[in-house]
């Protein structure tokens, strides 16, 4: 059985939204029959990640949280600023994995330097969303981020999964742009989705699969 590790700290408003995304991903993959390990809150730390990879390594690793060019911070309350969840020093733990990082700018160095089989991430800051009275923007953007693991769970390649994500973003951006008059925040979220779409990057083997 394909094993999946989903890591999602909660340290602030932004990571509350990204944790919602990750929890939805974990639920969906469990429903699809994958064995999913969840490291949420403070459990998204370097020590537990290392132990899990040594004892029961995952084939597909999903991270949703704060990041920068060369690291996934993981739980800030568990020391992630000083001892990040993943950085260039321990990126060997990602060897031959499929990695999906909903985190800011991590493809710039970590994605390029890791020995992952394929790395799906962003070279820009990633926008998440909050629900409003007019529109549940959180749910809208969550559905875009779900496209990649959903496509992979259905047996598609990382290239096909990435294309599905970009198509979903394009459709959502178009929806927002056509409803600027009705939804007061639609112009901002059209910009946010455009940023996420243009800043996404697939590195590694485009034909890799998890099933």
Image (cartoon, rainbow, N blue to C red):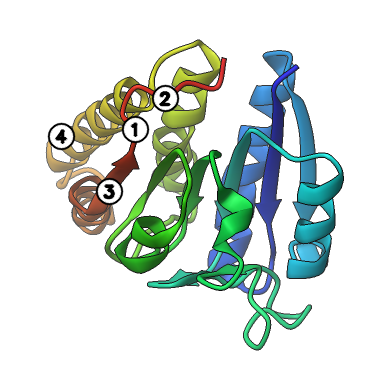
Q: Is residue 108 above or below residue 61?
A: below
Give x and y (percent) for residue 87: 54, 71
Disc 3 secondary structure class = strand
Label 3 near label 4: C-beta < 8 Å? no
Q: Earlier in the sequence, mark 4 or mark 2?
A: 4
Residue at x-position 21% and y-position 55%:
195
Quarter of the view holding residue 93: bottom right
Residue at x-position 34% and y-position 22%:
207
Q: Residue furthest bottom?
A: 82
Q: Earlier in the sequence, mark 2 or mark 3?
A: 3
Q: Which residue is mark 3?
A: 200
Comparing labels 4 and 3, the label whose residue is closer to the camera: 3
Q: Which residue is mark 4?
A: 174
Q: Is residue 177 above or below residue 114?
A: above
Give x and y (percent) for residue 26: 68, 34
Q: Which residue is mark 1?
A: 205
Comparing labels 4 and 2, the label whose residue is closer to the camera: 2
Q: Earlier in the sequence, mark 1 or mark 4?
A: 4
């Amino acid at each position: 059985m394909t094993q999946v590790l989903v890591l999602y700290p909660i340290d602030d408003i932004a990571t509350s939204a990204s944790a919602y995304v990750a929890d939805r991903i974990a639920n969906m993959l469990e429903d699809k029959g994958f064995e999913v390990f969840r490291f949420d809150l403070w459990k998204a730390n370097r020590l537990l990640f290392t132990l899990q990879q040594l004892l029961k390594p995952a084939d597909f690793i999903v991270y949703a949280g704060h990041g920068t060019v060369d690291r996934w911070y993981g739980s800030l309350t568990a020391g992630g600023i000083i001892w990040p969840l993943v950085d260039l020093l321990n990126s060997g733990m990602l060897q031959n994995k499929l990695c999906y990082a909903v985190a800011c700018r991590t493809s710039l160095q970590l994605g390029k330097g890791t020995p992952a089989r394929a790395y799906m991430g962003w070279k820009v800051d990633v926008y998440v969303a909050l629900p409003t009275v007019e529109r549940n923007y959180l749910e809208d953007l969550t559905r875009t981020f779900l496209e990649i693991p959903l496509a992979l769970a259905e047996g598609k390649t990382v290239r096909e999964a990435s294309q599905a994500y970009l198509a979903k973003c394009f459709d959502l951006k178009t929806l927002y742009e056509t409803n600027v008059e009705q939804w007061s925040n639609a112009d901002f979220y059209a910009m946010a989705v455009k940023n996420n779409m243009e800043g996404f990057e697939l590195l590694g083997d485009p034909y890799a699969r998890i099933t």
